[in-house]
Image (cartoon, helix red, strand yellow):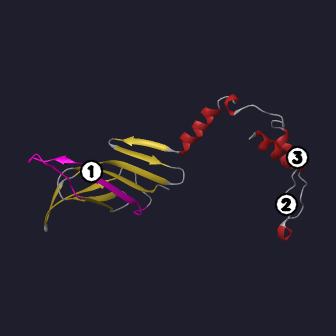
Amino acid sequence: MWHTAQICMSDIRQAKPKTTGAHGVKLNDIEPVRELLSTKANISHTHTVNQITNFNKAVNAVIDSAFTYQKIGDFEIRKYPDGTMIQTGLVVFTVVFTREGTTVHTDLVLPIAYVNKDYRCFITERYESRASGKGQYNWVFMQAKTNTTAKVTSWYLGSADWMTIGRWK
């Protein structure tokens, strides 16, 4: 790796300044780059990354500022620098009485709003023990309703783990 770095430094030092590039466009002189490099370590500079004071601390600070994690109650939110946001949590179903009959659904209010309602919803049922002593699996469905709300529908009362992925910026 050091050999590659030395070759690159050598190449810069020996580079001939170009005055014109493709289509006759004037290019910047290499001299400012040479001057900047001359204030840095010379070509025989050979310390390792581990010898740089506070290197790991500085790198971790940059990473921590780019990726964020929040826990709000039972919700977990992860934001990434490219604008992606992942939210997860647990939903407990409630019975809703409508003119058409009884349905089991819940309007899940997301803790952080997405930029629009074009986010993806994922849900998985939780195994619930029933009064008969036999376990029963539930059928659950989830869809984006607004940028802050998702509709969760199920066949039975119970709970499910959910996840949404979308854009926060």
Residue 27's disc number: 2
| Residue 68 drawn at (x, y percent) | 49, 44
**Quadrant in which residue 43 is drawn:** top right
Quarter that holds the N terminus:
top right
Q: Of the residues shown, which amino acid type is indicated by label 3?
A: Arg
Q: Which residues are magenta?
A: 116-139
| Residue underneath mark 3 | 13
Discs 1, 3 touching: Cβ within 8 Å: no
Q: Residues within 10 Å of mark 2 (few under 14, many from 20)?
A: few
**Residue labelled with disc 1:** 160
How far apart, in angstroms, are the residues tagged by discs 1 and 3?
A: 62 Å
Q: Secondary structure at mark 1?
A: strand
- Marks 1 and 2, how far apart in space? 60 Å
Residue ID at (45%, 47%)? 78
For numbered disc 3, what is the local secondary structure?
helix
- Residue 168 within the segment the image draws in magenta: no
Residue 5: percent from left, percent from top: 78, 43
Looking at marks 1 and 2 on the same chain, the residue that comes earlier in the sequence is marked by: 2
Q: Which mark is residue 8?
A: none
